[in-house]
Image (cartoon, rainbow, N blue to C red):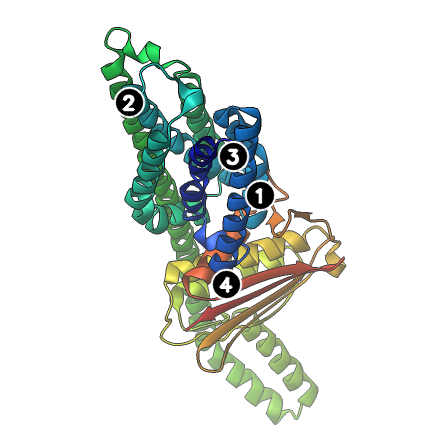
Amino acid sequence: MDMGKFLSAFLQFLILVPSAVSCYLPAKNRMKYSAAKTAVLCTAVILLYSSAAASLHGLFSLNVNAILLSSLVPFFFLYRRTVDLDLSCTLAIYVGVCAIETFPAQFAYSFDAALHPASGAAAFSFEAALLRLALSALLLAAFAYPATHHFPWAVDRLNFPKIWYSTAALSSVSLILNILSVPQSYSTLHAGRMQWLFPIFETGAFAMLVAVYVLFYRGAAIILEHAELRERMRLLEMQSRQYHTLQEHMRQTARLRHDFRHSIHLLASLARQNDIDSIRAHLAEYETSLADHTQADYCANVALNALFGYYQEMAVFANIRTDWRIELPEPLPFSELDMAALFGNLMENAIAGCQTVPREARYFCLTTEVRHGNRLYIVSTNSFDGKVHKGKDRYRSTKHSGAGIGLASIFAVSEKYGGSAKFSNSNTEFFADVVLKL
């Protein structure tokens, strides 16, 4: 076997190293294993694969690009098994990285054509392979910061499969065009002005693809900002409803206070007549009247209290037995909007689950408690019909395709505050356990 040919091919297959790193950076918060374990696994696989593939190329003169292309699918499934992402998001990241990584190859072909005009892509030189690897490493260095500080935010929060699939489709177009434009014979690059036009065209195509990704990120930010504003608006509507309820409660209380003097006169008259039974009946009726106009006070935070009141009314209307024990730290160390999203999604999902069973079987227990002085524990249990849609490690929505947006939001809030969120179920109950660091 020609060692020079082997080393040149081996160097070309090492392009998988920066490609793998680029795939994992946006998914850093969704990796199933630790970064060290994932790095060891990927390094072992890439080295073994590169050695075997380079040997096949050296022994049988197989085309390096053909070997790489045939490996895209198995590498995708390997990547999917090591991240906890929906198919749409996984595909968008993977195809996007593959599309980006074709550009160093195109520039390397142009460089190789200048060095070896009579050669072609099948005889990719060692120098060109080294340049390709260097350009890939530079791309990784250039995109490392946005890939680790901006895109994980979109990956964690953007739960719209259609948007991810659309991004994957655009990346696929770029990937396919670059594959089709690989110069099999470098003589084509020396025809007319192609020697200059080819790298200029590739530079423009690369700039357009990067612009697409930037626009995607900005679009995702706008979509999520709109969703946040919608959540804030919903919270304000709940607060407004709670405010009107409190106003009505105050009017009823004022009327009861005004009418109380009449009750005093009546009780005094009944006492003079020694009519104990009538006194007891009147007091029982008055006590019931007071209970009917008592406003529940769940916590000191006005907005969250309104939220709890809103869903309590919803639960009562749906004939759901509730047992809520709310303890929140004061002052609230978390964003009010984050807490509204977390509790709102928990209660909305629980009430929706209860409505899948007969009225007599509906119950919803919610407990929040500060433990150890630095943890807020939230435990939710509700009845439901036992029917769930579950992927490998994550519950999926029963209302639409893809992951449940409510559960994903709870996950995002728990991770934001250094905590965790776990969901489980039996045949009759759904459980949610959330921990937040104070």
- Answer yes or no: is residue 298 visible: yes
Q: Residues within 10 Å of mark 3 (few under 14, many from 20)?
A: many
Q: Disc 1 marks which residue? A: 78
Label whose residue precedes the other's in the sequence (3 or 2): 3
* Above or below 405: residue 67: above
Residue 146, x across and y down, in percent: 31, 46
Which of the pair 247/1 is nearer the observer? 1
Disc 1: CA contacts within 10 A as few (<14), some (14-19) or many (>=20): few
- Circle 2 sits on which residue? 115
Separation of residues labelled 3 and 4 (CA atoms): 66 Å
Where is residue 321? Give x, y as percent. Answer: 66, 65
Q: Residue at x 26, y 15 (%)?
A: 195
Residues at circles 3 and 4 in contact by the CB criterion of under 8 Å: no
User: Which mark sits nearer the N-terminus, 1 or 3?
Assistant: 3
Kindly check if marks 1 and 2 are in contact, taking CB atoms under 8 A apart as contact. no
Q: Which residue is mark 4?
A: 309
Label 2 near label 3: C-beta < 8 Å? Answer: no
**Residue 399 to residue 182: above or below:** below
Q: Amino acid at mark 4?
A: Gly
Which of marks 4 and 2 precedes in the sequence? 2
Alpha-carbon span between mark 2 and mark 4: 75 Å
Q: Secondary structure at mark 4?
A: helix
Task: Compute the Cα span from label 1 to label 2.
Answer: 37 Å
Q: Position of residue 141 (x, y in %)?
A: 30, 45
Residue sitting at 66 percent across and 93 percent down? 274
- The amino acid type of the residue labelled 3 equals Ala
Name the kind of residue labelled 1 in the image.
Leu
Secondary structure beneath label 3: helix
Q: Residue at x 67, y 55 (%)?
A: 354
Q: Earlier in the sequence, mark 1 or mark 2?
A: 1
- What whole-number distance in Å separates the C-alpha atoms at marks 3 and 2? 23 Å
